[in-house]
């Protein structure tokens, strides 16, 4: 289903390359994607090509790109049903639609394929504390139900679901009755990115009749976390990698959007802030001085989120972690550099191989991110590249086909 503009498939392709190089052949082909957000479609098409280039495949190998997972329910199936129980009855008692419109192929509709392994970022707005925490009673519950319907109809042996840690596990269990569910929790710090805030939960779904556990996922995850945490931990300034050209491009875009004359010679970009943002920066400075006795301009690791009022919420990196990224377009201001964090810098903190150094360390081609808008769109929609890769590998390493599967089939 939605995988953060294909973050999950790209991360898996990177790890697949490392696993294959270790002498264990691994080749998972993406057969279908679901993405409702039209903004993500061009990103996905580029990212499909990137994955194919990594796998040594041509442009022609493209998965189906479907839009709304709810299209797997017959038209009108969910009309006039509002309660959780009513929606479950409607989804579970109707057939799983077999052909839906596809954005990738030349046909009007494509047959929805089955899969051996699934990875999905399911909606978090009804789960997270930032929303109203309606959990299973929120309007996104039908997405979970339809995910359950697809995995059951196609008997997908193994899947991974990503969400915020508050995920309603009771609902997950109810809508995936054919599966054993194992929940893990992770942070970017588990993969070395301590300075990035993005706590997530992953749920591994193992089909009760088709799949069996070979290792305990939580034990394997602990081992990986301990190994990496001991060796590498980032601080916010590690992510400030934008070149002069990139900073200029972002400043020009911001000036254009805000109707301000761009000043090419000026490195202090405070003139691009609006009056509210300027007062927010002053407020942060005042609070910082009260707490530390010095100016935050002297702290290279300081980043402030300008979308909040600091009198109510302090969204800053005083304790070594960047503020949580939001979709409300608030700026992340770096006082020591008098500029905002660029989209590319956010991508670096999310583990994306968008610089030559990171790409070479990961032994993959660089993902292009010079286009300011594209980098911002990618950062705004992506998962944490390393977390999603590691969690998939844990699922794939810990589960295998049921040894006596034949007795069930
Ligand atoms: Zn298709």
Image (cartoon, rainbow, N blue to C red):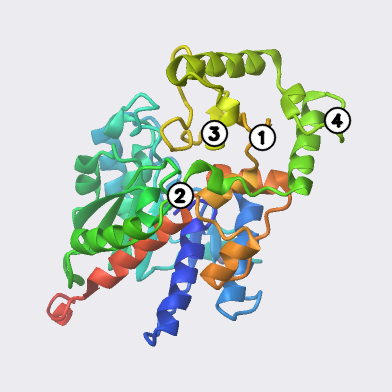
Q: Are marks 4 and 2 in contact (CB under 8 Å)?
A: no
Residue 291 placement, left or right of 148: right
**Could you tell me residue 308's position as x and y percent?**
52, 20
Is 364 located above or below residue 204 in the figure?
below
The one nearer the camera, 269 or 255, is 269
CA gap between label 2 and label 3 equals 23 Å
Quadrant assignment for ligand 1: bottom right
Sequence-wise, which precedes: disc 3 or disc 1? Answer: 3
Residue 262 marker: 4
Of badges 1 and 4, the one in the foreground is 1
Is 168 located above or below residue 186 in the figure?
above
On the question of residue 232 being in view, the answer is yes
Of badges 3 and 1, the one in the foreground is 1
The residue to which callout 1 is attached is 337
The residue to which callout 2 is attached is 234
Q: Among all residues in the image, which is located at the extreme bottom?
A: 23
């Amino acid at each position: 289903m939605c995988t953060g503009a294909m973050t999950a498939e790209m991360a898996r392709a990177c790890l697949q390359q490392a696993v294959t190089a270790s002498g264990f052949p691994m080749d998972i082909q993406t057969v279908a994607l679901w993405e409702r957000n039209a903004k993500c479609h061009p990103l996905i098409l580029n990212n499909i090509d990137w994955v194919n280039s990594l796998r040594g495949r041509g442009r022609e190998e493209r998965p189906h790109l479907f839009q709304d997972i709810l299209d797997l329910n017959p038209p009108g199936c969910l009309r006039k049903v509002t309660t959780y129980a009513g929606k479950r009855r409607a989804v579970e008692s109707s057939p799983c639609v077999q052909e839906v419109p596809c954005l990738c192929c030349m046909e009007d509709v494509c047959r929805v394929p089955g899969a051996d392994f699934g990875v999905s970022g399911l909606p978090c707005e009804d789960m997270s504390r930032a929303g109203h925490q309606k959990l299973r009673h929120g309007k996104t519950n039908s997405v979970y139900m339809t995910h359950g319907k697809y995995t059951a109809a196609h008997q997908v042996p193994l899947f991974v679901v990503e969400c915020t840690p508050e995920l309603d596990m009771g609902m997950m269990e109810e809508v995936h009755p054919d599966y054993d569910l194992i929940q893990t929790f992770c942070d970017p710090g588990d993969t070395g990115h301590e300075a990035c805030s993005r706590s997530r939960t992953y749920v591994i779904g193992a089909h009760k009749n088709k799949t069996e556990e070979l290792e305990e996922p939580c034990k394997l995850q602990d081992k990986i976390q301990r190994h990496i945490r001991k060796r590498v931990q980032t601080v916010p300034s590690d992510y400030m990698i934008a070149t002069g050209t990139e900073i200029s491009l972002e400043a020009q875009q911001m000036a254009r959007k805000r109707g301000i004359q761009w000043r090419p010679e000026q490195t202090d970009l405070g003139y691009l802030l609006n009056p509210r943002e300027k007062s927010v920066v002053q407020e942060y400075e005042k609070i910082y001085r009260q707490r530390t006795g010095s100016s935050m301009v002297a702290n290279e690791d300081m980043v402030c989120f300008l979308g909040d009022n600091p009198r109510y919420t302090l969204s800053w990196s005083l304790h070594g972690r960047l503020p949580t990224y939001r979709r409300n377009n608030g700026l992340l201001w770096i006082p020591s550099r008098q500029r905002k964090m660029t989209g590319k810098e956010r991508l670096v903190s999310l583990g994306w191989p968008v610089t030559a150094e990171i790409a070479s360390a990961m032994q993959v081609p660089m993902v292009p991110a010079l286009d300011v808008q594209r980098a911002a769109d990618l950062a705004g929609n992506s998962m944490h590249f390393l977390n999603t890769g590691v969690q998939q590998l844990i699922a794939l390493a810990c589960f295998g086909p049921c040894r006596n599967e034949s007795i069930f089939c």
